[in-house]
C-alpha cells in the first residue's frame, strides 16, 4: 500500500500548515530521514522528513498553499509498488489512471459524487485540486479552481456556500446545490431579492435591504454585499464621530496597566462599601505634641502617617482583612506581610508606592519610608518593586476638600481605605450639638473575602485607634508598656 | 544518549557582538552536536552588526530596497531557513538563539513560540513595560501596532535554530529599509523608546537568561 503523506500536526494548537517548498520532485527516490518538504506554522519552519523509503509518486498540495492538518499532501510509492496502487491510495476509485495534476475537464462536469465513501479527511476528488486561496476578496475560503470559476460566472458569493470537500473546501457540486436552493425562493413582499443568509443577517441587525445593492445571482443581495454595506456605514459613522472628538491622548504604560486593573477589579471583585465618621481632635493634638517633642530629629508627622500606622495596627489585629481571594485555587490566602500602598498623584499619573512590612514598625519608621517613596514618586524614580506586593491601600483625597468617597480596590487586594478632608462639622455629643473636627473614612471591600460584620469591626478598629490615638505613638509591639 | 547533566542543564552563553554568518555557523554546529549527543541544549545571547535577514516566507516587496542598495547602506543581507518574513538585527538589539530539542519540551511548535514570547514578556515586565502577545502574529507587542520583539524559528528533526530579537536600545531608523515581518503599518519600538531613557543591554540579557533557564532547564 503506497504511503499517504499528510500535513503533520506540529502543535496541539496547529490547525493548518503552509507548504513552503518541496525539496523532492515527483519521481525522486526518497530515503528514510531525508527532507521531503518545508512546512510553516505561525513563525516556525519545520523540515519535514520521510519516515519510509520510496519514490515520491505524487505531489497533491503545491508549494505556497496552506492546508488543514491531516490533509493529504503527497503520495510515496514504496519499493516494488505500481502506479495503479498509488491511484488506489489516493481514493480515486472512479478513474483508473492517476489523476492529472492540472484540472483537465471544463467547468460544468460534476466531480466525484459525495456518495463515495469518505474517510474522516476525504482526499480531493479527481480533477479538482485543493488549493487554499488567500485572495483579498474572499479571505481564506477554500474552493477548487473549477468551483471558483463557476462561482464567478454565476455571481455566487463563496462565503455563503458550505463546502463538503477536504477541509471544508467548496466543490462544484456544492455550488449546484446552492443554486437550486436559490431558484426555489421568491422575492419578498417589497420585491427585494436576497439570498436566505443575507435575509437572515439583515433581519438580525435590522438593516433595510432596499438601501443595499445586490451583486449575486439574479441581482440578489448576498452576504458580501451586506458586509460591504455595513463597512461603509461604519466608516461614515466613524467620520461623524471624529468631528465630535477634540483630540486623543496617548496612554502611558502605567495608564494602560491602571485601566486593566480597575476594569478587572470592578468586574471580578464584588465591592461593598461602609463608612464611619471619626472625631479627629485627639489625633491633631497627638500629631502636634509628637512634632513639638521630636523637633528636628524626626520627620514631621502628618495625618497620612498616623492613618498608615492605624491601618497597619488594625490589619495586624484583623488578619482576615489582609488577605486575597485566589480564583484558581478557589480559596482565600492570608498575607504574611502587611504592605500598605499609598495612592499618590504625580503629574496626572496615579501611582501607589508600597510601604513594606509595616507590622511592628513605629510611626516614625513608617513616616520616613513613606516620605522617601512619595519623594521618589514625585521625581519619577520609582522602581517596579516599589509599587509591587501591596496587601492594602490608602487613598487620601482630603487635601482636595472631598467630604466622602469610595476608592476602587487594587487587585489582588481585598480592601481599600478612602480618607477624606478633616473639617469642622456639627456633632451631637451627650444630647448637645457642638462643633467638632471630623473626617469620614470609607472602606471598599471585596465581599468574596470579607463580610459586612468583619468589615465593620475592622473599620471600627481604625476609628478607635484614631480617636484614642496614644497607641499610634508607641514603639512597635510594646503595647503593654 | 546524553549525560544526565547535559539533559537537565541549559548552557546560556553571552557572546557579545558576533557577525551574522559566524553566529549561524555556530548555531548549526551546536545543533548537529545536540543531535549526536556531543553537547547539550544551549542558548546564545548576542548582538549582531547591522544585518537584514529574509525568512522562508518573505515576500518580494518586504524590503524597500534591493540587496545591492541594502549593502551600500551598510547592511549585510542573508536568506535563512526560519519562519517569518524579513527582519533587521543590529547593535542595541538582544538576539537569542536557543538550540533545543523540542521533544524534551513537549514536541509542540506553537507552545515553543508562546514560551519564548512569555520569557520576553516577563523580562519586559521587570522593566515596567506591559507587553502582550497578539493572536496570529508571533512576536511581542505593546498593542496592535507597536512591536518590540520578533520571533522566527527553524526546526530540523525537532531541533531548533534561530529564535528571537528584542529591541532594547537600538537605532529604530535602521528598520526603515524594510517592512518588518512583512506587516505594513507596524511600528517597531524599543525598550528605550518606550521608557524614554537608555536601557543596558546586559541588564536585559541577565533577566532574559533567567527566564530561559526557568522555561527550558
Image (cartoon, rainbow, N blue to C red):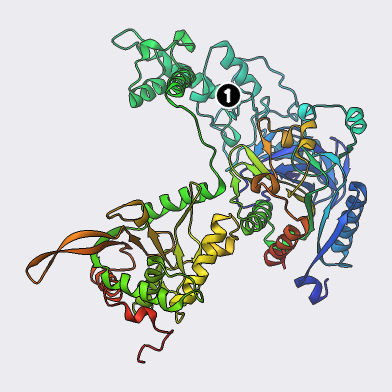
Figure quadrant of residue A435? bottom left
Figure quadrant of residue A85? top right
Question: Residue A61 in the image: x percent, y percent?
Answer: 72, 34
Question: Residue A156 in the image: x percent, y percent?
Answer: 52, 16
State left or right for residue B127 relative to residue A174.
right
Disc 1 is placed on an element classified as loop
Question: Residue A31 in the image: x percent, y percent?
Answer: 87, 49
Where A83 falls versus A205 (above or below)? below
Where A52 falls versus A19 (above or below)? below
**Which sits in the foreground, A227 or A89?**
A227
**Which sits in the foreground, B17 or A138?**
B17
Taking the spot 74% from the left edge, 38% from the top edge, the residue there is A19
Question: Residue A145 in the image: x percent, y percent?
Answer: 65, 21
Where A93 falls versus B35 (above or below)? above
Total number of numbered labels? 1
**Which sits in the foreground, B201 or A87?**
B201
Amino acid at each position: 500500500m503506497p504511503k499517504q503523506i499528510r500535513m503533520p500536526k506540529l502543535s496541539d494548537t496547529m490547525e493548518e500548515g503552509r507548504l513552503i517548498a518541496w525539496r523532492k520532485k515527483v519521481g525522486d527516490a526518497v530515503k528514510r530521514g531525508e527532507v521531503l518538504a518545508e512546512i510553516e506554522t505561525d513563525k516556525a519552519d519545520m523540515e519535514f522528513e520521510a519516515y519510509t523509503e520510496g519514490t515520491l509518486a505524487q505531489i497533491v498540495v503545491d508549494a505556497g498553499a496552506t492546508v488543514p492538518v491531516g490533509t493529504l499532501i503527497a503520495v510515496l510509492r514504496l519499493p516494488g509498488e505500481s502506479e495503479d496502487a498509488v491511484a488506489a491510495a489516493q481514493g480515486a476509485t472512479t478513474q483508473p489512471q492517476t489523476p492529472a495534476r492540472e484540472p483537465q475537464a471544463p467547468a460544468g462536469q460534476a466531480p466525484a459524487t459525495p456518495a463515495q465513501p469518505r474517510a474522516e479527511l476525504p482526499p480531493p476528488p479527481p480533477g479538482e485540486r485543493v488549493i487554499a486561496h488567500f485572495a483579498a476578496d474572499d479571505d481564506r475560503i477554500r474552493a477548487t479552481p473549477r468551483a471558483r470559476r463557476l462561482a464567478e460566472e454565476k455571481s455566487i458569493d463563496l462565503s455563503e456556500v458550505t463546502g463538503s470537500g477536504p477541509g471544508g473546501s467548496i466543490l462544484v457540486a456544492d455550488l449546484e446545490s446552492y443554486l437550486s436552493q436559490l431558484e426555489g425562493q421568491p422575492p419578498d413582499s417589497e420585491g427585494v431579492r436576497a439570498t436566505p443568509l443575507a435575509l437572515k443577517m439583515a433581519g438580525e441587525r435590522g438593516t433595510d435591504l432596499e438601501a443595499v445593492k445586490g451583486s449575486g445571482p439574479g441581482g440578489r443581495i448576498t452576504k458580501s454585499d451586506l458586509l460591504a454595506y455595513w463597512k461603509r456605514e461604519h466608516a461614515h459613522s466613524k467620520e461623524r464621530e471624529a468631528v465630535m472628538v477634540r483630540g486623543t491622548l496617548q496612554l502611558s504604560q502605567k495608564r494602560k496597566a491602571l485601566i486593566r486593573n480597575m476594569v478587572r477589579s470592578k468586574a471580578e471583585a464584588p465591592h461593598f462599601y461602609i463608612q464611619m465618621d471619626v472625631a479627629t481632635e485627639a489625633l491633631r493634638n497627638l500629631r502636634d505634641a509628637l512634632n513639638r517633642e521630636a523637633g528636628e530629629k524626626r520627620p514631621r508627622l502628618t495625618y497620612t502617617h498616623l492613618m498608615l500606622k492605624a491601618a497597619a495596627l488594625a490589619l495586624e489585629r484583623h488578619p482576615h482583612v489582609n488577605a486575597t481571594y485566589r480564583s484558581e485555587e478557589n480559596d482565600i490566602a492570608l498575607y504574611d506581610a502587611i504592605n500598605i500602598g499609598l495612592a499618590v498623584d504625580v503629574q496626572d499619573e496615579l501611582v501607589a508606592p508600597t510601604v513594606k512590612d509595616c507590622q511592628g514598625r513605629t510611626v516614625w519608621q513608617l513616616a520616613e519610608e513613606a516620605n522617601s517613596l512619595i519623594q521618589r514618586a514625585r521625581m519619577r524614580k520609582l522602581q517596579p518593586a516599589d509599587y509591587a506586593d501591596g496587601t492594602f491601600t490608602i487613598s487620601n483625597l482630603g487635601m482636595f476638600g472631598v467630604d466622602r468617597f469610595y476608592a476602587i480596590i487594587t487587585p489582588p487586594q481585598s480592601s481599600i481605605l478612602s480618607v477624606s478632608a478633616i473639617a469642622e462639622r456639627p456633632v451631637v455629643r451627650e444630647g448637645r450639638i457642638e462643633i467638632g473636627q471630623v473626617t469620614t473614612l470609607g472602606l471598599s471591600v471585596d465581599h468574596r473575602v470579607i463580610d459586612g460584620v468583619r468589615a465593620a469591626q475592622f473599620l471600627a478598629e481604625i476609628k478607635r485607634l484614631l480617636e484614642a490615638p496614644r497607641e499610634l505613638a508607641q514603639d512597635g509591639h510594646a503595647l503593654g508598656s | 544518549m546524553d549525560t544526565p547533566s547535559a539533559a537537565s542543564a541549559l548552557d546560556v552563553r553571552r557572546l557579545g557582538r558576533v557577525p551574522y554568518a559566524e553566529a549561524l555557523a555556530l548555531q548549526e554546529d551546536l545543533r548537529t552536536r545536540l543531535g549526536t549527543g556531543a553537547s547539550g541544549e544551549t542558548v546564545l545571547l548576542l548582538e549582531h552588526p547591522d544585518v537584514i535577514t529574509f525568512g522562508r516566507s518573505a515576500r518580494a516587496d518586504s524590503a524597500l530596497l534591493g540587496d545591492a542598495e541594502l549593502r551600500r547602506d551598510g547592511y549585510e543581507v542573508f536568506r535563512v531557513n526560519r519562519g517569518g518574513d524579513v527582519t533587521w538585527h543590529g547593535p542595541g538589539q538582544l538576539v537569542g538563539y536557543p538550540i533545543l530539542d523540542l521533544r524534551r519540551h513537549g514536541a509542540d511548535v506553537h507552545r515553543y513560540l508562546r514560551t519564548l514570547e512569555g520569557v520576553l514578556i516577563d523580562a519586559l515586565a521587570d522593566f515596567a513595560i506591559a507587553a502582550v502577545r497578539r493572536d496570529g502574529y508571533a512576536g511581542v507587542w505593546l498593542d496592535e501596532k507597536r512591536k518590540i520583539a520578533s520571533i522566527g524559528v527553524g526546526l530540523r528533526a525537532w531541533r531548533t535554530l534561530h529564535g528571537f530579537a528584542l529591541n532594547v536600545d537600538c537605532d529604530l531608523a535602521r528598520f526603515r529599509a524594510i517592512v518588518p515581518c512583512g506587516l505594513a503599518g507596524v511600528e517597531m519600538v524599543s525598550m528605550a523608546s518606550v521608557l524614554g531613557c537608555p536601557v543596558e543591554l546586559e541588564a536585559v540579557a541577565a533577566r532574559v537568561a533567567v527566564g530561559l533557564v526557568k522555561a527550558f532547564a
